[in-house]
Image (cartoon, coloured by chain):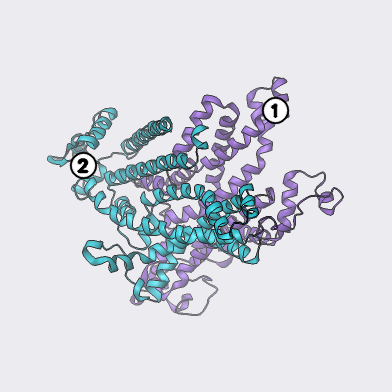
Amino acid sequence: MSADTAGPETLGSLSTEPEQQDPNSQQAKEISGKSPLRIALGRLARDKIAVICAVVVLFFVLCAVFAGPICHLFGVSLETPLASERVDGLNQGLPKPSMGPPNGPFTWDHPMGVAPRTGEDNLAYWLYGCRVSLTIATTATIFASLVGVVVGLLAGFLGGAVDKVLSFFIDLFLTIPFLLAALTIAPIINDRYNLSDNYSTIQKTALIMVLSIFGWMGTARLIRGEVITLREREFVQAARVMGMPTGRILFKELLPNLAAPIIISISLMLPTFVALEAGLAFLGIGVTDGVSWGQMILKGTNLTFFREYPQYLWQPLLGIVALVLSLNLLGDAVRDALDPKTRR
Amino acid sequence: MFAYVVKRLISGVLVVTLVSIAIFLLFWYGPSSPAQPICDRETSNRCSAAKLEIYERTLGYDNPVYEEYGKYVKGIFVGRTLTIASNEYDCSAPCLGLSFRTKQPVKEELVSRIPATFSIAIGGAFLYLLFGVPIGVAAARRRGTVADKALVSSFLFISSIPYYLFALLTWLYLTITFEVPFFSDTGYFPITQDGPFKWFSGLFLAWVALGIFGCTQYTRFTRGAMVEALSEDYIRTAKAKGLPTRTIVYRHGLRAALVPVVTIFGIDFGTLLAGTIFTERIFEVQGIGWWSLEAVQGRDLPVVQATALFSAVVLIISNLLVDVVYSVLDPRVRLS
């Protein structure tokens, strides 16, 4: 039972960090004169799992950004076709053999097949679903981070009554889970706007708002804790003595030192939001216009389709799993790279 | 100690009041008209402006909002009589409103749904601890070995997959594709009506999915806390005294390590009680989460409002309890 022999536990090859650094070692030369973020980036590049995950994430980002051109390349589109041309109404609405799986061979006209019953092209829906997922998750992450950073900075730096009030709100929001909030907001948005032309846009905006309003607390806590320790450092005191206004101290002096916690909180938020967006769509309380991985999964779980055509379920499902998994593992590697001493 | 509990209680009451006001306002100002869904329902989607006005008036939506909030709170404590169009409905305390679909007091159906959600929560939470803590302890004792690393990375892998997809695949493949006999009929069967076996087999798969997924987190917590506890000085003292390994690990190490785990467990159990929406939806367990989803689809605003309030209150109370228990276990908390 020797608790001291093990090195820092990590996923990849990060555990080569020596316990004590010799100033003349290879390691020390490598990091001399580099900013902490630079060092972390170097560590990340040496982590095989992180690199693989980064490539996977990049693939999804490219899919999302170039959804239009890729669809054009394959000659597919989001348009709803005349269903009877593509699906066999007598055979439970499953795709005709000429449309590819499950009844026919692979065809380049529809590389991922067509949806049962409606005959919509799966590739187009998959690509645009990826775009919706990443757009909502990224936007929500940006907003939640902004709110979290500002609240954390103010609470940590000003202290006293401001800190008490803000901490109270952090705790208050922490008690309410996303799912409950989304479930409560969904029927209200539906009731107010379901006849509007922009219903789908309003729905997405509402979803982003719910995710950001109930997602900023983690960042705020992290930043607040960091600011409380930074507040007493010499460079902040020097700035104060020089008569720098509080706003300038916050954003010019403190903010650059908060890069690591901000990156960490982003790395936690992004996969959570991707998973939540799809999950809410699956429950029917998120995006409901059909172009979303969660909605595709919901359709794929129809038992007839699932028995005859499991690929229809697996396509969006693998999309979410691969994206969330690689975002999570990448986030984990980033956290390790920023602070190799962390043990989870 | 007493002062601390009173302080936490006061802030708990404050939070409940704030949340109830927020939910009330949301359902008051949020919809274009709060009476629209029931008006549509009663008139088979031919709700004219005049009809809508009648519903709004009888439901009190033309009164000032603070007055109606007062009535709502009063209804929760002493009950009230609600009018929809020309019919009066009695709603005894605690009155959470009338369902737009059944015109029954929401409270009664809410109470009837609690056993299903509670069954899921208790079974899932039991498995969290049953698997999570021992595996975490074992990993911490073998810290740094191949077994530990394999366990940590495989658990990281599992917990990186969204929970609902994990549960969905479990359900689809075990009950639909392979039709495993014991699992094939999932759902909630009251123990008093269908007997304990049916109850157990209906929920078993939900528990396993919830338990396996949740225990990965507990393994991580326990492992982290154990690693920290085992590197303390008193553990070295215990080793130097020549105590048996078992005593050192369980009596000295685990006892210290369990305090944060118990705290997290309390919060998680509260979250489960407040609604296991994905689990209930996937495994077709008709508990509170399932019911509120159904209410969302049926535009049954009072039911959604009541479940939101119920879940929020359950969460706040469980957080409060955790804080108090934590202050008993760790005196440093209440002194700071």
Residue extending farthest to the front is B241
Q: Secondary structure at mark 1?
A: helix
Q: Secondary structure at mark 2?
A: loop
Q: Residue at x 29, y 28 (%)?
A: B66
Residue A309, position in %: x, y?
Answer: 43, 74
Q: Quadrant of the N terminus of chain B?
A: top left
Residue B51, position in %: x, y?
Answer: 18, 40
* Residue of label 2: B48
Q: Are marks 2 and 1 in contact (CB under 8 Å)?
A: no
Instruction: Answer few, some or many: residues within 10 Å of disc 2's Cα (few below 14, many 20 plus, some between 14 and 19).
Output: few
Please name the color used to draw chain B. Answer: cyan
From the viewer's perspective, tell me whether residue A330 is left or right of residue B212.
Answer: right
Residue A185, position in %: x, y?
Answer: 38, 44
Give a yes or no on whether discs 2 and 1 share a subunit.
Answer: no
Q: Which labelled disc corresponds to residue A236?
A: 1
Subunit that carries the residue with mark 2: B
Subunit that carries the residue with mark 1: A
Instruction: Answer few, some or many: residues within 10 Å of disc 1's Cα (few below 14, many 20 plus, some between 14 and 19).
Output: some
From the viewer's perspective, tell me whether residue B291 is left or right of residue A295.
Answer: left
Q: Is residue A204 above or below residue B324?
A: below
Between A326 and B263, the one nearer to me in the picture:
B263
Q: Is residue B40 above or below residue B152?
A: above
Q: Residue at x 28, y 39 (%)?
A: B34
Kindly tell me whether residue A69 is visible in this rendering: no
Residue A81, position in %: x, y?
Answer: 43, 65
Kindly tell me whether residue B19 is visible in this rendering: yes
Nearest-to-viewer mark from 2 and 1? 1
